[in-house]
Amino acid sequence: MKVAVLDDWFDTLRHLPCFEHLQGMDVTVFTDHEPDEARLAKRLAEFDAITLFRERTPITAGLLASLPKLRLISQRSVFPHVDVEACTQNDVLLCSNMKGGTPPYAAAEHTWALIMAAMRQLPQQMQSLRAGNWQIGVGKTLHGRTLGLYGYGRIAKVVAGYAEAFGMNVVWWGSEEGRAHAASDGRTLAASREAFFAEADVVSVHVRLKPETRGLITAGDLGDMRTTAVFVNTSRAGLIEPGALLSALDAGRPGFAALDVFDQEPITWADDPLAAHPKVTATPHIGFVTEDELNVQFDDIFRQVKAFVAGAPLNMINPEVWH
């Protein structure tokens, strides 16, 4: 079984316990990102299986048509970057664990780090100190302020615990189903969607990107936020209406943003309009990039490859191709 592990930029996975699942297989780890589809198809032509590092590499119909030997794609969580219909047409099984186990603490911790960094202007203060200019302004205390959490999932619940430990008030919004679950758990819901965005000092979005959630946060939502508020996104850039956040920041509502995700990734150019915006605290999609979290995620991914080789696939998304 020839297995390609894609986009492991820092050659991390082979040094984690999860890699033992691939023992005895012919494994190639690619530590670069190949954006050109034709070159990528040539690179992967001889492989039976590929594992995906989140959405770093899109799996298109054109790519799949160029990989006649491919039998398995193994990944984790939702798959807006994978053409499932084309997988089925090309007799390629897609396996993806959609349930998860423990909360993704790495993402929750990074969300909290961004909130604190934005509220206390940490990147700007550090830059000023290094330049010999000492302090540049006055930050904001979290205690007593309001955190709005959009989405009632595992990460948001962990972030809520951090906020409560810091003395923040937490209010919730999300889908009708999510709001119902939050209310049944005794959580505080905003009076309305408009009130949620208008009254929070910090709004943090924690929603999976699926076709029905793309563009979920609109220009109107952002425009309802305060000029002093911070908008935080460590989930996916596609949850925001295209172009809306940059326009909103330029207009002053919200006043600031803290971002770990962008429409185009990786950003390999200087002075990106959003990443380098003076009102943005930005990191390069590292919310999940810890050894601990990668071992959890790839334990699922590599276990799916092992199960496929054993003839008992796990977490099949298109089981009709299995025979």
Image (cartoon, helix red, strand yellow):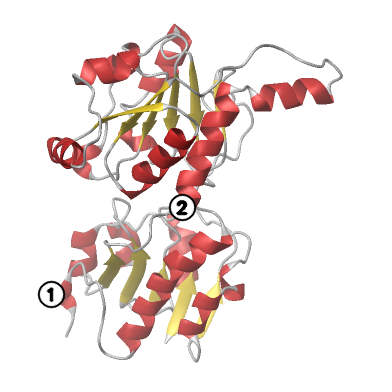
The spot of residue 180 in percent (x, y) is: 13, 38
**Mark 1 falls on what kind of element?**
helix
Q: State the quadrant of the C terminus.
A: bottom left
Quarter-of-image position of residue 172: top left
* Pointer 1 local density, CA inside 10 Å: few below 14, some 14–19, many at least 20: few
Of badges 2 and 1, the one in the foreground is: 2
The three-letter code of the residue at mark 1 reads Glu
Residue 54 as seen in the image, left or right of residue 128: left
* 94 in relation to 61, above or below: below
Q: State the quadrant of the N terminus.
A: bottom left
Could you say which is closer to the camera, residue 172 or residue 238? 172
The spot of residue 45 in percent (x, y) is: 43, 74
Is residue 36 visible in the rendered image? The answer is yes
- The residue shown at (81%, 23%) is 129
Residue bearing the label numbered 2: 105
Query: Residue 271, labelled with which disc?
Result: none
- The residue shown at (54%, 54%) is 289
Quarter-of-image position of residue 78: bottom left
Residue 139 as seen in the image, left or right of residue 230: right
* 195 in relation to 115, above or below: above
**Mark 2 falls on what kind of element?**
helix
The spot of residue 200 in percent (x, y) is: 36, 19
Could you say which is closer to the camera, residue 105 or residue 61? 105
The three-letter code of the residue at mark 2 reads Tyr
Measure the C-alpha gap from mark 2 to mark 1: 35 Å
Residue 236 as seen in the image, left or right of residue 221: right
Residue bearing the label numbered 1: 320
Could you say which is closer to the camera, residue 294 or residue 148? 148
- The residue shown at (53%, 44%) is 266
